[in-house]
Amino acid sequence: MTMMVNGVCYHAEQYGEGEPLLLLHGFTGSADTWRPLAPFWPDFRVMAVDLLGHGRTEAPKDARRYRIEHAAADLAALLDEWGVEQVNVLGYSMGGRLALAFAVWHPHRVRRLVLESSSPGLKTEEERRARREADEALARKIETEGVRAFVDDWEKIPLFATQQALPDSVRAAIRRERLRHTATGLANSLRGMGTGVQPSFWERLGELAMPVLLVCGENDEKFCRIAAQMHERLPNSELVCVPDAGHAIHVEQPGIFAKIVSEFMTKGEV
Protein backbone atom coordinates (compact mmCIF):
# COMPACT_ATOMS: atom_id res chain seq x y z
CA MET A 1 0.00 0.00 0.00
CA THR A 2 1.03 3.62 -0.52
CA MET A 3 0.55 6.26 2.17
CA MET A 4 1.31 9.99 2.26
CA VAL A 5 3.15 10.75 5.51
CA ASN A 6 4.42 14.21 6.44
CA GLY A 7 4.61 15.14 2.78
CA VAL A 8 6.43 11.96 1.66
CA CYS A 9 4.92 8.99 -0.19
CA TYR A 10 5.67 5.79 1.78
CA HIS A 11 5.26 2.18 0.70
CA ALA A 12 4.27 -0.35 3.36
CA GLU A 13 3.00 -3.94 3.45
CA GLN A 14 0.88 -5.82 5.97
CA TYR A 15 0.38 -9.54 6.60
CA GLY A 16 -1.94 -11.37 8.95
CA GLU A 17 -3.91 -10.33 12.00
CA GLY A 18 -3.13 -10.06 15.69
CA GLU A 19 -0.76 -8.02 17.77
CA PRO A 20 1.10 -5.49 15.58
CA LEU A 21 4.76 -6.10 14.74
CA LEU A 22 6.56 -3.30 12.87
CA LEU A 23 9.60 -4.37 10.82
CA LEU A 24 12.37 -1.96 9.82
CA HIS A 25 14.97 -3.09 7.27
CA GLY A 26 18.64 -2.18 6.93
CA PHE A 27 20.53 0.01 4.45
CA THR A 28 19.93 -1.18 0.84
CA GLY A 29 16.98 -3.28 2.04
CA SER A 30 13.20 -2.86 1.75
CA ALA A 31 9.96 -4.33 3.03
CA ASP A 32 10.69 -7.28 0.73
CA THR A 33 13.48 -8.25 3.15
CA TRP A 34 10.89 -9.55 5.61
CA ARG A 35 8.48 -11.31 3.26
CA PRO A 36 10.07 -14.79 3.69
CA LEU A 37 9.70 -14.49 7.48
CA ALA A 38 6.02 -13.50 7.56
CA PRO A 39 4.79 -17.15 7.52
CA PHE A 40 6.75 -17.75 10.75
CA TRP A 41 4.64 -15.10 12.53
CA PRO A 42 1.01 -16.08 11.76
CA ASP A 43 -0.32 -14.66 15.02
CA PHE A 44 0.95 -11.14 14.39
CA ARG A 45 -0.19 -8.25 12.25
CA VAL A 46 3.12 -7.84 10.45
CA MET A 47 3.77 -4.33 9.11
CA ALA A 48 6.85 -3.79 6.94
CA VAL A 49 7.88 -0.33 5.74
CA ASP A 50 10.19 0.82 2.95
CA LEU A 51 12.24 3.48 4.74
CA LEU A 52 13.08 6.84 3.17
CA GLY A 53 15.07 6.49 -0.04
CA HIS A 54 14.55 2.74 -0.15
CA GLY A 55 12.31 0.40 -2.12
CA ARG A 56 9.10 2.02 -3.35
CA THR A 57 9.11 4.84 -0.81
CA GLU A 58 9.91 8.30 -2.14
CA ALA A 59 13.55 9.48 -2.23
CA PRO A 60 13.55 13.20 -1.38
CA LYS A 61 16.33 15.32 -2.87
CA ASP A 62 16.96 17.12 0.43
CA ALA A 63 19.24 14.92 2.58
CA ARG A 64 18.02 16.70 5.73
CA ARG A 65 14.61 15.07 5.27
CA TYR A 66 16.25 11.69 5.97
CA ARG A 67 17.46 12.63 9.45
CA ILE A 68 16.53 10.05 12.05
CA GLU A 69 14.28 12.41 14.00
CA HIS A 70 12.15 12.94 10.88
CA ALA A 71 12.14 9.20 10.11
CA ALA A 72 10.96 8.46 13.66
CA ALA A 73 8.21 11.07 13.35
CA ASP A 74 7.15 9.40 10.10
CA LEU A 75 6.80 6.06 11.90
CA ALA A 76 4.56 7.65 14.52
CA ALA A 77 2.42 9.16 11.75
CA LEU A 78 2.23 5.79 9.97
CA LEU A 79 0.99 4.13 13.15
CA ASP A 80 -1.62 6.88 13.51
CA GLU A 81 -2.79 6.19 9.96
CA TRP A 82 -3.09 2.50 10.80
CA GLY A 83 -4.92 3.22 14.04
CA VAL A 84 -2.20 1.53 16.10
CA GLU A 85 -1.35 3.11 19.44
CA GLN A 86 1.31 0.64 20.64
CA VAL A 87 3.45 -1.72 18.59
CA ASN A 88 6.23 -4.27 18.84
CA VAL A 89 9.20 -3.03 16.83
CA LEU A 90 11.93 -5.10 15.16
CA GLY A 91 14.80 -3.28 13.47
CA TYR A 92 17.83 -4.61 11.63
CA SER A 93 21.10 -2.64 11.40
CA MET A 94 20.10 0.84 10.12
CA GLY A 95 16.49 -0.07 10.87
CA GLY A 96 17.60 -1.03 14.37
CA ARG A 97 19.06 2.41 14.92
CA LEU A 98 15.74 3.89 13.83
CA ALA A 99 13.81 1.46 16.04
CA LEU A 100 15.92 2.50 19.01
CA ALA A 101 15.44 6.19 18.24
CA PHE A 102 11.69 5.64 18.01
CA ALA A 103 11.71 3.85 21.38
CA VAL A 104 13.69 6.67 23.00
CA TRP A 105 11.48 9.45 21.62
CA HIS A 106 8.14 7.60 21.66
CA PRO A 107 8.51 5.06 24.51
CA HIS A 108 4.76 4.87 25.18
CA ARG A 109 4.23 3.50 21.67
CA VAL A 110 6.66 0.59 21.93
CA ARG A 111 5.52 -2.59 23.69
CA ARG A 112 8.62 -4.67 22.99
CA LEU A 113 11.77 -3.86 21.06
CA VAL A 114 13.98 -6.22 19.04
CA LEU A 115 17.35 -4.92 17.81
CA GLU A 116 19.16 -7.14 15.31
CA SER A 117 22.82 -6.30 14.66
CA SER A 118 22.22 -2.72 15.77
CA SER A 119 23.98 0.05 17.65
CA PRO A 120 23.00 3.20 19.59
CA GLY A 121 25.35 5.24 17.40
CA LEU A 122 28.93 6.40 17.84
CA LYS A 123 30.08 7.54 21.26
CA THR A 124 32.36 10.48 20.42
CA GLU A 125 32.20 13.48 18.11
CA GLU A 126 35.55 12.49 16.65
CA GLU A 127 34.11 9.12 15.59
CA ARG A 128 30.99 10.77 14.21
CA ARG A 129 33.00 13.29 12.19
CA ALA A 130 35.14 10.57 10.63
CA ARG A 131 32.02 8.56 9.77
CA ARG A 132 30.31 11.59 8.20
CA GLU A 133 33.33 12.12 5.97
CA ALA A 134 33.40 8.46 4.95
CA ASP A 135 29.65 8.40 4.27
CA GLU A 136 29.86 11.58 2.19
CA ALA A 137 32.64 10.05 0.09
CA LEU A 138 30.54 6.92 -0.44
CA ALA A 139 27.44 8.98 -1.25
CA ARG A 140 29.33 10.89 -3.93
CA LYS A 141 30.66 7.65 -5.36
CA ILE A 142 27.14 6.25 -5.62
CA GLU A 143 25.97 9.39 -7.42
CA THR A 144 28.95 9.35 -9.76
CA GLU A 145 29.29 5.66 -10.58
CA GLY A 146 25.70 4.51 -10.14
CA VAL A 147 23.87 1.91 -8.06
CA ARG A 148 25.15 -1.18 -9.90
CA ALA A 149 28.82 -0.31 -9.34
CA PHE A 150 28.07 0.46 -5.70
CA VAL A 151 26.25 -2.86 -5.18
CA ASP A 152 29.13 -4.74 -6.80
CA ASP A 153 31.44 -3.28 -4.14
CA TRP A 154 28.93 -3.43 -1.28
CA GLU A 155 28.46 -7.17 -1.66
CA LYS A 156 32.18 -7.67 -1.05
CA ILE A 157 32.59 -5.78 2.23
CA PRO A 158 33.70 -7.93 5.23
CA LEU A 159 30.40 -7.32 7.04
CA PHE A 160 28.64 -9.56 4.52
CA ALA A 161 31.38 -12.16 4.02
CA THR A 162 29.28 -14.88 5.67
CA GLN A 163 26.57 -14.40 3.05
CA GLN A 164 28.84 -15.98 0.45
CA ALA A 165 27.72 -19.35 1.83
CA LEU A 166 24.04 -18.66 1.12
CA PRO A 167 22.30 -20.48 -1.74
CA ASP A 168 22.68 -18.75 -5.12
CA SER A 169 18.93 -18.08 -5.26
CA VAL A 170 18.99 -16.21 -1.93
CA ARG A 171 22.02 -14.15 -2.89
CA ALA A 172 20.42 -13.32 -6.23
CA ALA A 173 17.25 -12.12 -4.49
CA ILE A 174 19.29 -9.87 -2.18
CA ARG A 175 21.16 -8.44 -5.17
CA ARG A 176 17.92 -7.72 -7.05
CA GLU A 177 16.56 -5.93 -3.99
CA ARG A 178 19.67 -3.76 -3.73
CA LEU A 179 19.70 -2.92 -7.44
CA ARG A 180 16.13 -1.59 -7.31
CA HIS A 181 17.25 1.46 -5.35
CA THR A 182 18.08 4.88 -6.72
CA ALA A 183 21.39 6.69 -6.38
CA THR A 184 19.60 9.67 -4.81
CA GLY A 185 17.87 7.54 -2.20
CA LEU A 186 20.97 5.63 -1.11
CA ALA A 187 23.28 8.65 -1.15
CA ASN A 188 20.91 10.82 0.86
CA SER A 189 20.19 8.00 3.29
CA LEU A 190 23.90 7.94 4.08
CA ARG A 191 24.03 11.72 4.42
CA GLY A 192 20.89 12.11 6.49
CA MET A 193 20.63 8.93 8.54
CA GLY A 194 24.17 7.56 8.82
CA THR A 195 25.74 6.90 12.21
CA GLY A 196 27.88 10.02 11.80
CA VAL A 197 24.76 12.20 11.71
CA GLN A 198 22.43 10.55 14.21
CA PRO A 199 22.63 11.37 17.93
CA SER A 200 24.37 8.92 20.23
CA PHE A 201 21.83 7.06 22.35
CA TRP A 202 24.34 5.33 24.62
CA GLU A 203 23.49 7.56 27.59
CA ARG A 204 19.75 7.11 27.08
CA LEU A 205 19.59 3.32 27.08
CA GLY A 206 18.88 3.33 30.80
CA GLU A 207 15.62 5.20 30.16
CA LEU A 208 14.04 2.31 28.24
CA ALA A 209 11.69 0.36 30.49
CA MET A 210 10.16 -1.90 27.82
CA PRO A 211 11.57 -5.41 27.25
CA VAL A 212 14.40 -5.31 24.71
CA LEU A 213 15.86 -8.25 22.81
CA LEU A 214 19.35 -7.88 21.36
CA VAL A 215 20.23 -10.38 18.64
CA CYS A 216 23.64 -10.77 17.03
CA GLY A 217 25.38 -13.38 14.89
CA GLU A 218 28.38 -15.09 16.47
CA ASN A 219 30.49 -14.40 13.36
CA ASP A 220 29.79 -10.68 13.58
CA GLU A 221 32.27 -9.85 16.34
CA LYS A 222 31.87 -6.06 16.20
CA PHE A 223 28.11 -6.09 16.68
CA CYS A 224 28.24 -8.86 19.27
CA ARG A 225 30.57 -6.62 21.27
CA ILE A 226 28.22 -3.64 20.85
CA ALA A 227 25.22 -5.79 21.85
CA ALA A 228 26.99 -6.92 25.03
CA GLN A 229 27.71 -3.31 25.96
CA MET A 230 24.10 -2.33 25.30
CA HIS A 231 22.88 -5.29 27.37
CA GLU A 232 24.78 -3.93 30.38
CA ARG A 233 23.04 -0.57 30.13
CA LEU A 234 19.50 -1.60 29.27
CA PRO A 235 17.43 -2.27 32.43
CA ASN A 236 15.15 -4.93 30.89
CA SER A 237 17.06 -6.68 28.11
CA GLU A 238 18.01 -10.12 26.81
CA LEU A 239 20.96 -10.93 24.57
CA VAL A 240 20.98 -13.83 22.10
CA CYS A 241 24.03 -14.72 20.02
CA VAL A 242 23.04 -16.93 17.08
CA PRO A 243 25.54 -19.60 15.98
CA ASP A 244 26.63 -19.87 12.35
CA ALA A 245 25.39 -16.38 11.48
CA GLY A 246 26.90 -13.05 10.58
CA HIS A 247 25.34 -9.59 10.39
CA ALA A 248 22.06 -10.45 8.62
CA ILE A 249 20.77 -13.19 10.92
CA HIS A 250 17.25 -13.07 9.49
CA VAL A 251 18.72 -13.97 6.08
CA GLU A 252 21.35 -16.49 7.16
CA GLN A 253 19.28 -18.30 9.81
CA PRO A 254 15.67 -17.26 9.14
CA GLY A 255 13.92 -20.11 10.97
CA ILE A 256 16.04 -19.75 14.09
CA PHE A 257 15.73 -15.97 14.04
CA ALA A 258 11.94 -16.08 13.64
CA LYS A 259 11.64 -18.54 16.55
CA ILE A 260 13.79 -16.35 18.81
CA VAL A 261 11.63 -13.33 18.02
CA SER A 262 8.35 -15.24 18.49
CA GLU A 263 9.40 -16.59 21.88
CA PHE A 264 10.44 -13.13 23.04
CA MET A 265 7.19 -11.53 21.83
CA THR A 266 4.99 -14.05 23.60
CA LYS A 267 7.02 -14.42 26.79
CA GLY A 268 4.86 -14.17 29.88
CA GLU A 269 1.59 -14.60 27.98
CA VAL A 270 -0.87 -17.35 28.76
Image: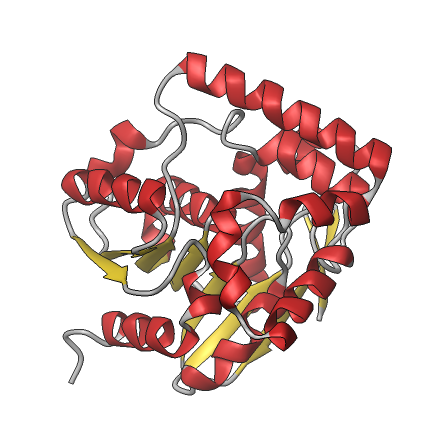
Measuring 43% from the left and 72% from the top, which residue is drawn there? 20
Give the side of residue 196 with respect to residue 267, left or right. Answer: right
How many marks on residues? 0
Measuring 54% from the left and 78% from the top, which residue is drawn there? 36
Measuring 63% from the left and 60% from the top, which residue is drawn there? 30
Give the side of residue 49 with respect to residue 143, left or right. Answer: left
* Residue 173 in picture, x, y percent from top left: 67, 70
Is 121 rendered above or below residue 109? above
Is 198 rendered above or below residue 83? above
Is 123 rendered above or below residue 212? above
Is 215 rendered above or below residue 165? above
Residue 206 image-quadrant placement: top left
Q: Quadrant of the N terminus?
A: bottom right
Q: Nearer the viewer, residue 80 or 202?
A: 202
Q: In this rendering, does residue 53 appear at all?
A: no
Q: Quadrant of the C terminus?
A: bottom left
Give the side of residue 54 with respect to residue 122, left or right. Answer: right
Give the side of residue 31 with respect to residue 118, left or right. Answer: right
Q: In this rendering, does residue 34 appear at all?
A: yes
Point out the residue furthest to the top here.
126
* Residue 123 in picture, x, y percent from top left: 35, 23
Residue 135 image-quadrant placement: top right
Q: Nearer the viewer, residue 31 or 240?
A: 240
* Residue 7 in picture, x, y percent from top left: 74, 46
* Residue 198 in picture, x, y percent from top left: 49, 29
Q: Which color mode does the image show?
A: secondary structure
Measuring 34% from the left and 44% from the top, which residue is drawn there? 223
